[in-house]
Image (tube, rainbow, N blue to C red):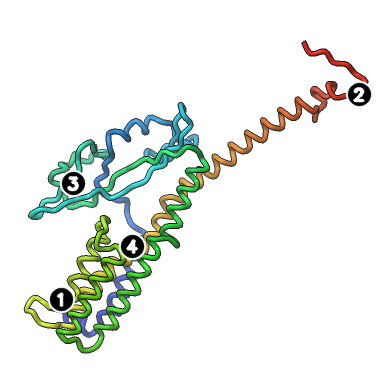
Amino acid sequence: MVPRAEREVGIIPQGEKWAQVRREKILSRPPSKAIRVTSKETLPVFSFPPLAKGDERKYTVRFSPFTGEIYVPIWHHPLVVEDGGKRSLENPSGLVQLRRPKEHQVDFGDLPPREVVQLYYLCLPSIEAAIRQQVHIMDNYRIGKEAQQIEGLMNWLDFQFQATSGQITRQSLAALAEQTATFLVNSGFLTAVDPTKKRIAELLAKANQPDRLGRVNPLVVRVRLRAAFLDAVRREMMPVLVSEKFSPFLGILLMEREITRGIIIEEAVATLDTMVGITKRGAVAFEKNKTVLFW
C-alpha cells in the first residue's frame, strides 16, 4: 500500500529528494561500525613500520625493513550467508576480528546485523608499483568498470521509470521482468558479492512482479524501483568515498617517491663530485701534466 502523501507528491520527485538527503548523509557519515576481520597471515604486517615517518594510523601503508616491499591496505566484503534469519561468514577459517576499544567479540557463525569488511594487505615490490595500483583503483571507480556499471544501472532505472509511468498490463510487466533479468545478467549485478549490489539486484527482480494480492499495480512497481534507485545512489557515491580513502595513501607514496629520488640524486651528485671534481674534490686526477699515484 502506497501512502497517500507519496501519491500526492509523486514517486520520482520524492525519490529525488530522498536521494539528495542520502548523498549528504553519506558525505557527512559517522565512522563505520562495520565488523572488521582479517586473516591470521595478515597480522605480521602490523609489526612493519609505516612508510611515512610519524604515521600512527593502524591501517596504513607499511613496508618490510627486510625486503623493501610495500604493503597497501585494502578492504573487501567477505561472503556472508543467511539461513533462517541467521547470518554467518561463509569461510570463517583462519579469520580473526579486528576489534575497536571496548568492542565485543562476535561469533562468525551468528553475526549481528552489521556490515562485515575484511582487511587485506597488497604486497607490492616497489613504490612505483604501489602508486600504479592506487591510481588503478581510483580510476576504476571514476572511469573504469565500476563507473560504467553504475552508469548503466542509472540508465536502466531511468528507462524503467519511464516504462512504468503510464498504464501497465500483465503482459507489459512480464516483458519488463524478462528485460530486467537480461540486464542483471549482462551487467554483473546478478553475481555481485557486494551487499548493496545484491540488494539492488533483488529489488529490481522484485519490481516487475505483481503486488501481494497478485495485481498489476504501477504505484507499487515504482516504489520498488525507487528503493533500488536509493541503493544505487549509495554506489554512485563510491568514487567520492574511494577518493577519500585512497588519496591519502597515494599522497604518502608520491611523497616517499620524491624523497627517494632526492636521495638518489644527492648520492649521484656526490659520486660525480668525487669523480670529476665539481667542487675540486678529486679534480687533480683530471688536470693536465700531473701524475697521480693511486695506492
| Circles 3, 4 touching at the beta carbon (< 8 Å) | no
Q: Position of residue 114 (x, y in %)?
A: 21, 51
Q: Nearer the viewer, mark 1 or mark 4?
A: 1
Residue at (38% x, 30% y) in the render: 47
250, 4: nearer the viewer = 250
Asked whether residue 53 is in view, the answer is yes
- Circle 3 residue: 90
Direction from residue 29 to residue 208 in the image, left or right: left
Question: Where on the picture, by quarter, is residue 165?
Answer: bottom left
Residue at (13% x, 83% y) in the render: 216
Q: Secondary structure at mark 4?
A: helix
Label 4 is placed on what type of residue?
Answer: Arg
The disc placed on residue 235 is 4
**Considering only order in the chain, which callout, 4 or 2, is on the residue closer to the N terminus?**
4
Tell me how far mark 2 sits from mark 3, CA to CA: 79 Å
Residue at (91% x, 24% y) in the render: 288
- Circle 2 residue: 288
| Circles 2, 1 touching at the beta carbon (< 8 Å) | no
Label 2 is placed on what type of residue?
Answer: Lys
Most extreme residue toward the bottom is 167
30, 220: nearer the viewer = 220
Question: Which quarter of the rendering shows the C terminus?
Answer: top right
Q: Secondary structure at mark 3?
A: loop
Q: Secondary structure at mark 2?
A: loop
